[in-house]
Amino acid sequence: MHRILISILLITRVLSQPKSTNELATHTQLELKITEIVTRNFYKPIGNLDHCTLSLTNPPEVWTSSFLKTSSKYYLANLQFSNQTQKFDSVPQFSSVCQHVLVWVSKLISAALKQSFVLQQATSANYIFIGDQSQIEQVQEQIYYSQLKYKICIKLPGAKFQVNKMFPTDQQIFTGVNLRVGLIPMEPQTILGEDKIPIAGYCFKFMETMTTRYNFTAKYYHKWGRLQQYPNGTWGGPLGDLLYDRLDAYVGLVHNFERHPWVSFSTNILMVHLYFLTTFPHRVIKWEATFYPFDAHAWIVIFVTALLTTVVFLSYPEQKQNTMISQTIFTFCAMLQQSVKKLPRPSWLAIVFLFYSIVISCCYNSNLISFLTFPEEEFIPRTAEELAEAQEYRIIFMHFPGGAGDSYFKHSESPVFVSLRNRFEYERDFLKCVTEAVLNPKTACLAWNMISSGLLAKNLSLLSTSFTLYKSEPIISSTANVGLPKESKYFDLINQGAGWLQNTGHFHRWNQDALRLLKQRGRSWLLTRKNGSLYRQLERLMGEVFDMEKMPLDLRSFVVPFTTLFIGAILGSLIWLLEIVSFYMESQKQLRNCYKIFSTLTLSPKIKRWA
């Protein structure tokens, strides 16, 4: 059985002197009457709660504390007093707040009430004011009274109860209100025109739609600031503005567990992701691409087949006209599709091997071009786990102190996130983080998509349809919401409007329109700086991205054949030199032998006489 505590603040006038027995009895009767009214008429269950526990805290020296349980059959739809026949307009049975505040009006309580309402702001709790005619009129003239969503005035002329109840409709809550609205001062959430007035962005477009629909005005504040809680427990930045009555709503505030107890968040308007940005992988043509048409097992089978065929040719006994060299090179000529004068024996094996070589060569040639012209991509991390393992990568963290990402990494004990956190380079200049990732290899920028998308669109996009960075899978996902003070009377309608517009895709469309506008501005700005280094680097990167599927053959495609030719030329030259040296040495040997022969010869007398 679900339970919820209804706290009722019962404030009464401070008694300067002891009360008589009759006065105490009168107060006791009044307490019972108020208890009956609250028990029977001011109970609101939430969802499927069966009943609430009602606690009455009474001032000292007047009443004693009493605790009552109310049944779920009593709720505001049955509001009707015993001394009146009129049935008042009902408050919705289901509400986000189950709280009633009883206020006994007195002259000494104005300051305390004002401070209470400043902290609570435009609250949606049920306030019940009890007092005489003049006191109730003074309350209704106060500014804080108009901020209340539900209020009931019980006038006490003597011993009778008269009820003046005001339950405004949805339209009445916003009519004539000038809402103080905070907008994220970043693009594409809010885009300002030349006169510094918002013109685009889903934060501004949402409030513009709400003001048109519910007939109220809004004053916009482009405020940011500290997102962390101060050591003394107070808040600055957007949360401080909401808590301390400086803003009525803040559009685009990310919901996390640290902010949840302090601010009411609407339904999500957009999903936001923390990811890392890095350059696209460079194209690489490896020299091993020559061997890619066949895998290792296929190459082994081809080599063994050629070797065994050569052995059979060499060992065949009936080789007549074929030399050993011609028998050996036949297999290589067949594999290389070269002609031969005569087939070695056995002829049937030579014919079968020729057919085998034709099939193998055709398969190799058809696949070789695809591997040479389609380059491989170098490895880049695509997930947080891969980035943690890529120790050579530099990690720059787009730092929001106190933000959702900062809180998550600060408290996470996952080995992956601890490894990433230890390598963080904290950067408060968001544009620098993105630019470093674009222009430097092996660099990753951890950023929220709601911030980085605007920076890329406005500063680093040459084309209106593309970006120059690879976006990883989301590391953290959260929601952008509308933040309002706790129990704000505007919460129900703003939450309802945010839900409708999110379901119909309006927020997504507004965000895309804002990015398109930023790309147009950024491209115009870059075109005026064509001679700059940034433009040339972006143009080179875009060329690499768009030419990913095609690439002409270059020297790297022919590393294997050129290397083979070079090695063959060197070996041939060495053999040629060796042959020359061998021939020279052999010639010298023969000359020496001839000299010895001639030196031992004796000429005959006739020869001598002739000589």
Image (spheres, rainbow, N blue to C red):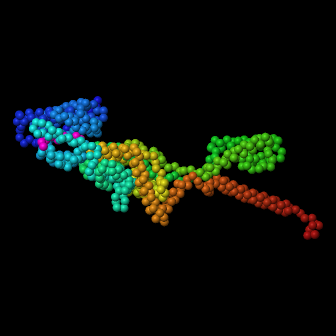
Q: Is residue 85 above or below residue 491?
A: above
In the rendered image of this protein, does residue 435 appear above or below residue 260?
below
Which image quadrant: the N terminus?
top left
Which residue is at 62% across, 51% downward?
372
Residue 453 rendering spot, x and y as whole percentages: 42, 53
Q: Please provide percent x and percent y for residue 552.
A: 61, 56
For the residue pair 3 and 472, the one nearer the viewer reads as 3
Magenta span dominant secondary structure: strand
Q: Is residue 56 left or right of residue 348?
A: left
Q: How many numbered callouts?
A: 0
**Residue positioned most to the right:** 606
Assess whether residue 148 is covered by the magenta stretch.
no
Question: Residue 584, position in %: x, y?
Answer: 76, 60
Whether 129 is among the magenta residues is: yes
Write down the region rendered in magenta: 125-133
x and y percentages locating residue 339 in the rendered image: 77, 50
